[in-house]
Amino acid sequence: MSSTNEDDPPSPPTAVAPVELVPRFVGRAETEDDVASRRRWVEARTGARLTHVGAMSTPIADLSGNIENPIGAAQVPIGIAGPLRVEGEHARGIFYVPLATTEGALVRSYERGMYVLTRAGGVTVRLDRDQNRVSPTFLFADVAAAAEFASWVEANFTEIAARAEATTRHGRLLRIECHPLGAHVLVDFVYSTGDASGMNMMVNATEAAAKWMVASAGALGFDIFSGAEGEKRAAPRLFAGGKGKRANAGALVPAWLLRGALRTSASELERFSARVAAGHATAGTVGTQGQLANGLAAMFIACGQDVANIVNAAAGITRFVARGDDLYVSVTLPSLTVGTVGGGTGSGTARECLDLLGCAGAGKAKKLAEIVAATLLAGELSMASAIVTGELPAAHEALGRNRPDTPAPR
Ligand code: NAP
């Protein structure tokens, strides 16, 4: 076990109180015993009992590259919602969707929307863009040098792409866009990342290309991230796509289903959506939608996606348009960041949940994106209906309360 930490300077400049470092097992892969011993170390220091944290069934060897200093796993319950009929280009048929959440009423809400959409004939989904990007900043002495670099980049795309793509078998550099900013140039490296969400892949590729660009074009240096890439940030820029799949999901819901299953109507929901758009304009939200983050979080946790990408994936637009007494419902997700290879997708509960959707492994990322989009549409329809009928507070009261001072019903 190691008690050193590379973050510690070798000799502090002034006398500082000693700190006790989390145990590490240097120079070898973690074992189950290492995890248990680190967990006991935390228990001894905090007095907390970590019985449930320690009840992890995924072998630690399967989580290499996913976690440092492991002590166990967080257990988030998974509910299943469906049936959901999806009519995509990659996902077709009936799906039962795993949702990991502790928000009572959430699974029921999505399930209700799925039932209605499925009875209505299913959700049509189309992806029209599949890209991801990293946007480093290159540094120059002045505006003139920055402008010259921007022209140089355009002229040298082929060589830059070769440097980037030499680091990856599946990543492809689609284009580069330069944005001079004073003496800096912000450069969008836009990639196709196959079935991986691609952040590690793209960062590696971009770094290799950027080092060559600095050496060849006389830049003073570069920062690998400028913040403009929209990774894990809500920003209007996301509506042009470029942070994952751009998805549209829609369905025509007939009046009899709106009335019979949701106790509402097309005109009520259309008027509601106009009121909500005004509310969102007042708040200055990025996009206008009901609860995209709820379905995204629940599916991302279940399916091993990088949960922090919800911040960019939840930038979307939900629309309810009356067509006579029927209602056309749609959701637009410009930056849906998902993968079925790499990251947290390959093991444990995530792999099982991807399996139950038929989305595990290579060739499945677009299918997963279509199922996510259809699921989110179900949540939008259900939530809006619950609000206009005044049923939302009662549903949460019945299904989603855990007052700590009130015993749960047995
Ligand atoms: P990864 O697990 O780092 O790498 C996945 C690798 O799988 C790819 O690089 C690719 O290798 C390989 N692969 C095999 N079959 C593939 C297929 N069909 N399609 C695409 N790739 C295939 O995953 P990642 O998606 O690049 O990165 C996601 C991870 O990055 C997440 O864990 C996320 O949390 C993390 N992340 C990193 C940063 C960062 O700054 N680096 C920032 C945010 C998040 P080849 O490249 O050789 O083709």
Image (cartoon, helix red, strand yellow):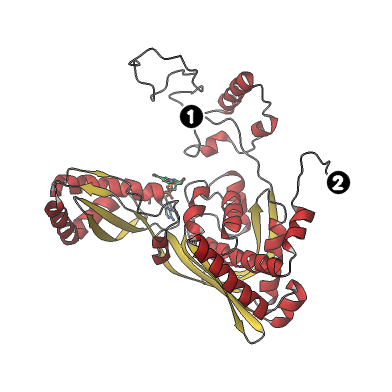
Q: Is residue 394 above or below residue 262?
A: above
Quarter of the figure with residue 95: bottom right
Q: Does the rendering let one see residue 88?
A: no
Secondary structure at numbered mark 2: loop
Q: Is residue 346 left or right of residue 381?
A: left
Secondary structure at numbered mark 1: loop
Instruction: Residue 73 in the image: state x and y as whole percent.
Output: 61, 37
Instruction: Residue 141 in the image: state x and y as whole percent.
Output: 14, 46
Mark 2 surroundings within 10 Å by alpha-carbon count, few (fewer than 14), some (14 through 19), many (20 or more): few
What amino acid is found at the position of numbered circle 1 in the picture?
Ala
Residue drawn at x 24%, y 58% is 178
- Quadrant of the rendering where the C terminus is positioned: top right
Quarter of the figure with residue 266: bottom right
Q: Which residue is mark 1?
A: 29
Label drawn at residue 409:
2
Mark 1 surroundings within 10 Å by alpha-carbon count, few (fewer than 14), some (14 through 19), many (20 or more): few
Identify which residue, 239 or 5, lies in the foreground. 239
Instruction: Residue 310 in the image: state x and y as whole percent.
Output: 51, 53
Q: CA distance from mark 1 to mark 2?
A: 45 Å
What amino acid is found at the position of numbered circle 2 in the picture?
Pro
> For disc 2, does the CB lie below 8 Å from ligand 1?
no
Instruction: Residue 149 in the image: state x and y as whole percent.
Output: 16, 54
Q: Looking at the image, do the residues carrying marks 1 and 2 touch, with CB atoms under 8 Å apart?
A: no
Q: Earlier in the sequence, mark 1 or mark 2?
A: 1
Q: Is residue 313 above or below residue 388?
A: above
Label drawn at residue 309:
none
Residue drawn at x 66%, y 21% is 47
Residue drawn at x 69%, y 66% is 387
Q: Does the rendering let one see residue 408?
A: yes
Q: Residue furthest bottom?
A: 324
